[in-house]
Image (tube, grey):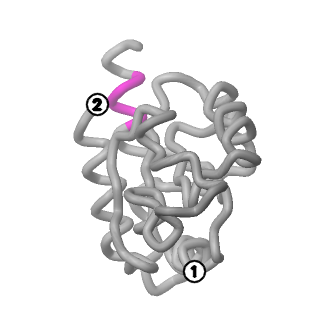
Amino acid sequence: MSRLGLWGLKKSPWVYHVAAASCNNCDIEILELLTPRYDVERFGVVLVGSPRHADALLVTGVINRKSLPRVMEVYEQAAKPCLVIGVGTCTCSNHMFKNSYNAVGPYDKHLPMHAFVPGCPPKPEAMILGVVKALSKL
């Protein structure tokens, strides 16, 4: 990718939200980012409806046997380079589902993760810092 393309990606990342098997607490906090209180759109962060238009993926929830192929398909559809940001403790370590028969492990076993935002659920401020951290890795 050209320098101009990377500069544009750093200044205005478009994100796609992937809810693998979440309890919806992280999903609610992600939607909180779009409210006027946090207003991440002023930084250029836009939530898009298709992974083909996304520069970053925000993944939430535990990855299990049923959701793994779908998450991998969404990742393959995303334009490259694509940042993958794990939101919530479940993406980091499977949290309370660690010994579950259906969980196939944390996301970094299956996807190249660029940042994790721990917390159950994480605060919107922490998610903003996680996106900034991932963008700094470009």
Magenta stretch mostly in which secondary structure?
helix
Query: Residue drawn 43% across and 69% down?
Result: 95
Q: Rounded to the nearest whole Å, what is the CA distance between mark 1 and mark 2?
A: 29 Å
Is 6 within the magenta? yes
Q: Is residue 123 left or right of residue 34?
A: left
Nearer-the-camera pick, 94 or 131: 94
Q: Position of residue 80 (x, y in %)?
A: 52, 22
Amino acid type at image mark 1: Asn
Label located before the other in sequence (1 or 2): 1
Q: Which mark is residue 25?
A: 1
Under circle 1, the secondary element is: helix
Residue located beneath label 2 in the image: 138
Q: Is residue 27 left or right of residue 111?
A: right
Q: Which quarter of the rendered picture does the N terminus lie within?
A: top left
Q: CB of mark 1 within 8 Å of CB of mark 2?
A: no
Q: Is residue 87 left or right of residue 18?
A: left
Q: Position of residue 39 (x, y in %)?
A: 47, 74
